[in-house]
Image: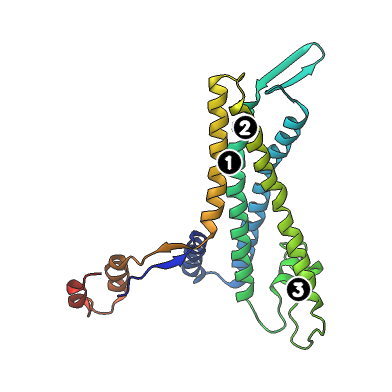
Amino acid sequence: MSNKTIWISIRAIKLHEFHSTLRIVGKSTDWSTGFIKLSEVQSGAIASFLKICSPLLLAYLVLNSLNSGFEISLTIQTVTASIPTAYFTVVCSLIYLFATLSLVHLLMTMTIRARWVANGFVHGFSGSMYGVLTGHDETALALPIFNNSFFTEKFHTSAFLTILLAVALFGLVIPFVALGCFLTQVQVAVALNGSTSFFEKIAAIFGIFLIASTAIYAVLFHIPLPMRKNVFRIRYGFLCSVSASFPHPRIEHWLHDDP
């Protein structure tokens, strides 16, 4: 068996892992039930992402309005409460990491649901319209994507509108990335300032590490990485288990082969 290096992303492996599980579960699940379940998973992912992003938005407003001299201070009448900026931003950096994980999870669920909808193709049936009828899709009627084999566009208007919407939706990621840059900038200033305490500097450096780790994760999760086939697991874990005869007909060849 050839054991050449292949390039595949962790994202692709996770999608394959989910679809493999879905095929096993799907043996007793019809298309409509799977669609409703995946729609509920996607709705839950959206709610989770928005919920975790709310503290980040609040943190941005706090840092812009209450941050002064590497301290966040709030005065109510004659009472003043303050906290070092470094301690506040390191918590924000941790939330930013979890928000990124939640965003990736959301994008994965959207991809899986879209593939499930595509698998339910029947002439005259639209999976997105089925989502509208079941209350699991609130935008399908407004999207310029349609499935009609009786008409062909002359100017590809629907494709143009789809690209415009895709670019606009992708633009929503820009504020999220900008927030990470903003947190990094604030923590770098704290770490390099001579008047901050040792523990504040440690907190700021750890916050920078969290933001950097988030960026590295986001890149490495999606880009193809060099991998090799696990020949031993394929032969003795998979092929032997599905073989109709025991031992496997090629067992002697495998024993003399050096993978």
Q: Nearer the viewer, mark 3 or mark 2?
A: 2
Count of number-bearing discs: 3
Q: Nearer the viewer, residue 110 or 245?
A: 110
Q: Give the mark nearer the N terminus: 1 vs 2.
A: 2
* Residue 211 marker: 1
User: Tag 2's secondary structure?
Assistant: helix
Q: Distance of mark 3 from mark 2, alpha carbons?
A: 44 Å
Q: Nearer the viewer, mark 1 or mark 3?
A: 1
Q: Give the mark nearer the N terminus: 1 vs 3.
A: 3
> Residue 57: x percent and y percent?
73, 39
Is residue 222 found left or right of 152 in the rendered image? left
Q: Nearer the viewer, residue 218 or 158?
A: 218
Q: Which residue is mark 3?
A: 145
Q: Which residue is mark 2?
A: 187
Q: Residue at x 68, y 49 (%)?
A: 47
How crowded is the residue under tag 2: few (<14 C-alpha within 10 Å), some, or many (20+)? Answer: many
Q: Residue at x 71, y 58 (%)?
A: 170
Q: Residue at x 62, y 32 (%)?
A: 187
> Residue 45: x percent and y percent?
63, 52
Image height check: is 255 above or below 249? above
User: Tag 3's secondary structure?
Assistant: loop
Residue 31 in sight here? yes
